[in-house]
Amino acid sequence: MRKISVLILLLTGLVLSVSAATKAEADKAYQENNFKGAIKMYESILDEGKESAALYYNLGNSYYKDNNISKAILNYERALLLSPDDEDIRYNLEMAKSKTVDKVVPKSKVFIVTWVNGIRDMMSESAWAEYAIMFFILFIVALCCYIFGKKIVVKKVGFTAALAFLCMTLVSHMFAGAQKEKMVVRNASIVMQSSVTAKSTPNESGTDLFVLHEGTKVFIEDGSMKDWKEVSLEDGSRGWVPAQSIEQI
C-alpha cells in the first residue's frame, strides 16, 4: 500500500512538472515570436481545465500578435472576467477593440448606475467576498463596543461604526454576488466571423437589420434555439445571428 501511495505521489509530481514545463514553453515560444506555437500550447493548458486570468491574457496577446483580433478580444474579455481590476488587461483589450470595424456607442446610463458599476468592477468576486468578511468582523467588534462599553462616547462611536460596517458588509456581499453572476451567466459573446448580418427572425429569410464584424461584443438575449441566437448591442440594437458566428466569453 505504501508503494502505491509513493507511486501516486511521483505520478502527480510528474504531471505537475509537465504542466509547468508546458507553460514555460508557451511563454518561451511567445518571447521568440512563435505566436502560433504559443497559441497552441496555451490552448492545450486551458483545455486541461487550468483556467486563469494570466493564461487568457497571454493567449490574447499571442492572438493579437498573430493578427487574430476577434480571438484576442475574446481572451482578453475572459481574462477580465477573472481579474476585473487588472489595468494591463483593460489596456490591451481597448487596443484590440480599436482595430475592429464596428464602433458601437453604448446607450447613456444614469450617472449613479455607471458609478456603482465602476466600483463593482474594481475587484473580483473573491476580493469583494474577503472585504465582506473583514467588514463583518469589524461590525461585530463595533457592536461589542456599543453593547459592553461603559462610557457614552464609546457606545456612540460603537453604534455609528457598527452601522457603517454593516452597510459596507452588505455592499461588499452584493458586489461579490454580482461579480459571481457575471462569471456564471456569461451571456456576452464576441463575433468571430469577418461579417455577419443580423436578421429580424431566426432564419435566412428574415429581414436584414444590420451587419456585424469580427471582434464586436454582443449580448445573448434569447439562447433557446440551437442554430440561431438573438443578440443585442450596447447601443440597444437587437437581431438574430447564426449561433456559429459568435463565441461566448
Image: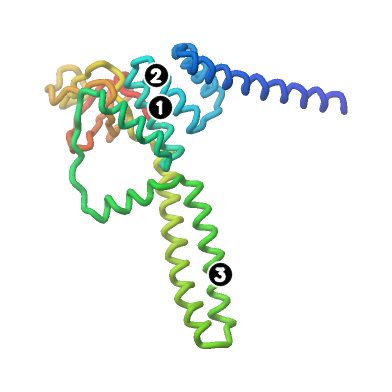
Q: Are marks 2 and 1 in contact (CB under 8 Å)?
A: yes
Disc 3 secondary structure class: helix
Callout 2: helix, strand or loop?
Answer: helix
Dot 1: what SS?
helix
Residue 216, position as x, y percentages in the image: 26, 27
Q: Which residue is mark 2?
A: 63
Q: Residue furthest right?
A: 2
Q: Nearer the viewer, mark 2 or mark 1?
A: 2
Q: Position of residue 153 (x, y in %)?
A: 50, 85
Distance between the alpha carbons at the discs numbered 1 and 3? 42 Å
Q: Amino acid at mark 2?
A: Tyr
Tell me the amino acid under the disc marked 3: Ile
Q: Which residue is mark 3?
A: 140
Quadrant position of residue 9: top right
- Colour style of the rendered protein structure: rainbow
- Residue 62 horizontal side relative to residue 222, left or right: right
| Residue lying at 65% horizontally and 19% vertically, measured from the top left | 18
Q: Would you call the spot at circle 3 few (<14 residues within 10 Å), some (14-19), or many (20 or more)?
A: some
Q: Quadrant of the rendered structure where residue 2 is?
A: top right
Q: Name the amino acid type tagged 1.
A: Asn
Q: Quadrant of residue 214?
A: top left
> First in sequence: mark 1 or mark 3?
1
Q: Which residue is mark 1?
A: 75
Q: Earlier in the sequence, mark 3 or mark 2?
A: 2
Relative vertical location of residue 155 with respect to residue 18 in this rendering, above or below: below
The answer to whether 127 is drawn above or below residue 215 in the figure is below
- Front residue of 122 and 173: 122
**Residue 138 horizontal/vertical position (percent):** 54, 66
Q: Nearer the viewer, residue 230 or 233?
A: 233
